[in-house]
Amino acid sequence: MSKNKDTYSNEPFGTPRKRTKRTFLGALFVIILLAVTLSLSVALIIAYLTPYVSPSTFGSLTIVGIFAPILYAAVLICMLLWLITKRWKTAIALIVLLLPGLFRISDFYNIDIKRSVEPKVDRRSVSLMSYNVRGFYDDDRVRVLDEYVDYFGSIDAVDVVCFQEFMRDSRGISRLDSVMLAQHRHSYKNDVVEAGEVVLRTYSRYPIIASGSISGAGRGTSQWVDIVVNKDTMRVFNNHLYTMSISEGDSEDIESGMILNDGDRMRSIVDRIANNSSIRVDHVDTLRMVIDNTPYEHIICGDFNDAPMSYVYGVLVDDKRDAFVEAGSGYGYTFRPMYGTLRIDYILHSEGLDTKNYSVDREVTLSDHLPVTARVKFNK
């Protein structure tokens, strides 16, 4: 019996000291993982709340919504680690936390199931493109209007084209008018002019019978046009909501990681995003009132300068349908900087319309935004 005890105490799996070391490292890992899990969980809860709480109330916490997909993935990884370590209660708590996010995944990522088939074009459908063209200047601040003219001359004709940040320089703009006219028998256009510049322009192959604008007093602009599609009238809202104030230099430094070495500048960026989110609130609340009083089926498109997990998107998408959610595929980013992580350009529409297809042209890199196109059809 004594011999058996000696044999057990001298087993070949290591001395008691080694066992203690493994226990210490394991405990340290659990403590670090717990701290990381708690931090990420709180951040994810804040992200869940951002669509429902005004930035005026939430302040700088609204920026958390921008990182919702990253936070969701990080919490998912933590949950898997807790499962591996057999901490079942913690893992179950994280599963419960992740459940609400399942219903928002399609705001950011969609699986291509039956969307590769081009729908039949009929008289009750309308194709629409939304495109922030940055005044027709490229990443090097060179005016590239000719390249835009070539681009629109090479793609399939689009029935309605909504431009944001349209014109800083009027030279040669008539060439764009010509290429739009060349694609259709008729071409109509409507502008919103602020401080002597065309900030929004909408081209339409269908007659424009009425129009109006909603000014954010230099802090964003919205335009609406009523078009007659055969015998149906549709209202199109073309929007450029107030900027996020992220410069090209900011984007480059964020992508390179240099911003991490400058705490003051990082705080400045966070404050700018938060303050500008608050500025967009008044504009979007007014816009929503106009939308609610629209007597026609309608499309709401443009550069919202906010992510899907935001108050702005939440207000505008309420009781509407998002063309990307309905018919998009893959990760739906529309803003080229920031590693292509942000979807801030949208095409939404009323319930009386169906989305037949949706696409983002990621091959064209003339602007910092990508052109977003959808085809919708009257369903009544």
Image (cartoon, grey):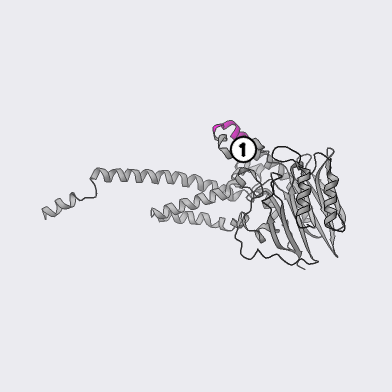
Residue 107, position as x, y percentages in the image: 63, 55
Per the image, the residue denoted by label 1 is: 252
Residue 266 is a magenta residue: yes
Q: Is residue 32 left or right of residue 185?
A: left
Q: Residue 77 lies in magenta, yes or no?
A: no
Left or right: residue 61 versus residue 224 is: left
- Mark 1: give few (<14), some (14-19) or many (20+) Cα within 10 Å: some
- Tell me the quarter of the image containing the N terminus: bottom left
Along the line of sight, the residue nearer the viewer: 226 or 365: 365
- Is residue 150 something one can see in this rendering? yes
Q: Which x, y percent locates residue 276?
A: 69, 40
Predominant secondary structure, magenta span: helix
Query: Which quadrant of the figure has residue 247?
Result: top right
Q: Position of residue 52 (x, y in %)?
A: 64, 50
The quarter of the picture where the C terminus appears is bottom right
Looking at the rendered structure, the secondary structure element under dot 1 is helix
The part of the image, by quadrant, that contains residue 115 is bottom right
Where does the magenta region start and end?
261-271
Q: Nearer the viewer, residue 242 or 132?
A: 132
